[in-house]
Image (spheres, coloured by chain):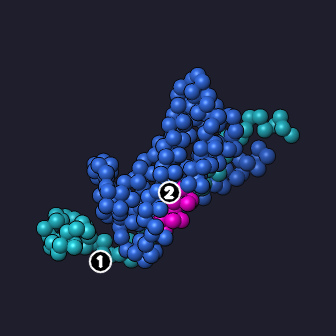
């Protein structure tokens, strides 16, 4: 959209009503959405870490005993 | 920095795509090609993590953090980049731990599921980066068909976040207990 902005094309000419409504919600609730986004990002990483720890015992090297 | 970031992202995306293919070949095929794929997977994964870290660090320097957080597209790009790094870190740790036995028995299914999930995530991170650099791909439309308009922030309801954290903590505790039991 940068060329349109540079030419000064009004937003309504290059966005649907639905898009503008969604952007409006994003701006109006920006802080709440950003905080929920952070929580989602971190919760996903916690779930990945937990899943890794749960899978690790099943991924032990079969030959590990031979080394000791 | 934008150009440097675009250049650096070729490394994780290339290595992750290669690792995903190697996992699929190693899990479903037999013969020399499958053997080579299984044997060479760990170095590819380690290099992918180094590339991913470099791309993320440089990526965070492209714009000020305040600008990054102000845009839904950038928020989505950051989330998918970190989740991609997370998924492929999981695969790296598991493959490193299992050594030659990473593909034996049901383990291969865990690797296949993780690799395909990671593939979806780094593809999303890539197409979102394309939007930010002014070169989007048709993959965004595929995400749209799956119900996610990439111009809106990707976030979960509070209950889903709680479920993710509870699952993470419960599985982590279970894994640690099992590790102690089996020594």
Is residue B26 something that shows in the picture? Answer: yes
Residue B50 appears in which quarter of the rendering?
Answer: bottom right
Q: Which mark is residue A28?
A: 1
Q: Which residue is mark 2?
A: B8
Magenta part of the chain: B52-60
Q: Residue at x 62, y 49 (%)?
A: B46
Gap in angstroms between the C-alphas marked 2 and 1: 35 Å
Residue B19 appears in which quarter of the rendering?
Answer: top right
Camera-near label (2 vs 1) is 2
Viewer-nearest residue: A58 or B80: B80
Residue furthest to the top: B31
Residues beneath discs 2 and 1 located on the same chain? no
Q: Quadrant of the C terminus of chain A?
A: top right
Viewer-nearest residue: B93 or A59: B93
Q: Residue at x 56, y 54 (%)?
A: B51
Query: Does the magenta segment cover residue B26?
Result: no
- Residue B45 in percent (x, y) is at 59, 46
Judge the density around disc 2: few (<14), some (14-19), many (≥20) Cα neighbours within 10 Å: some
Q: Residue at x 22, y 68 (%)?
A: A3
Mark 2 and 1 residues: CB-CB less than 8 Å, in contact? no
> Quick check: B34 above or below A53?
above
The hue of chain A in the figure is: cyan
The hue of chain B in the figure is: blue
Query: Does the magenta segment cover residue B54?
Result: yes
């Amino acid at each position: 959209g940068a060329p349109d902005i540079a030419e000064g094309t009004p937003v309504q000419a290059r966005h649907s009503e639905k898009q503008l409504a969604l952007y409006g919600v994003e701006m109006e609730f920006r802080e709440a959405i950003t905080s929920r986004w952070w929580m989602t990002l971190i919760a996903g990483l916690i779930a990945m870490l937990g899943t890794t720890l749960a899978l690790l015992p099943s991924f032990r090297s079969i030959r590990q005993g031979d080394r000791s | 920095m934008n150009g440097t970031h675009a250049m650096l992202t070729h490394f994780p995306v290339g290595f992750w795509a290669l690792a995903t293919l190697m996992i699929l070949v190693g899990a479903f095929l037999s013969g020399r090609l499958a053997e080579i794929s299984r044997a060479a997977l760990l170095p590819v994964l380690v290099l992918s993590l180094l590339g991913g870290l470099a791309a993320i660090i440089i990526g965070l320097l492209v714009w000020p953090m305040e600008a990054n957080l102000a845009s839904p597209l950038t928020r989505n790009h950051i989330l998918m980049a970190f989740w991609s790094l997370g998924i492929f870190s999981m695969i790296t740790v598991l493959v490193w731990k299992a050594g030659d036995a990473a593909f034996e028995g049901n383990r291969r299914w865990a690797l296949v599921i993780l690799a395909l999930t990671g593939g979806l995530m780094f593809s999303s991170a890539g197409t979102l980066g394309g939007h930010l650099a002014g070169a989007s791909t048709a993959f965004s439309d595929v995400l749209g068909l799956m119900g996610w308009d990439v111009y809106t922030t990707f976030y979960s309801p509070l209950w889903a976040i709680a479920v993710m954290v509870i699952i993470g903590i419960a599985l982590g505790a279970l894994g640690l207990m099992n590790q102690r039991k089996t020594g």
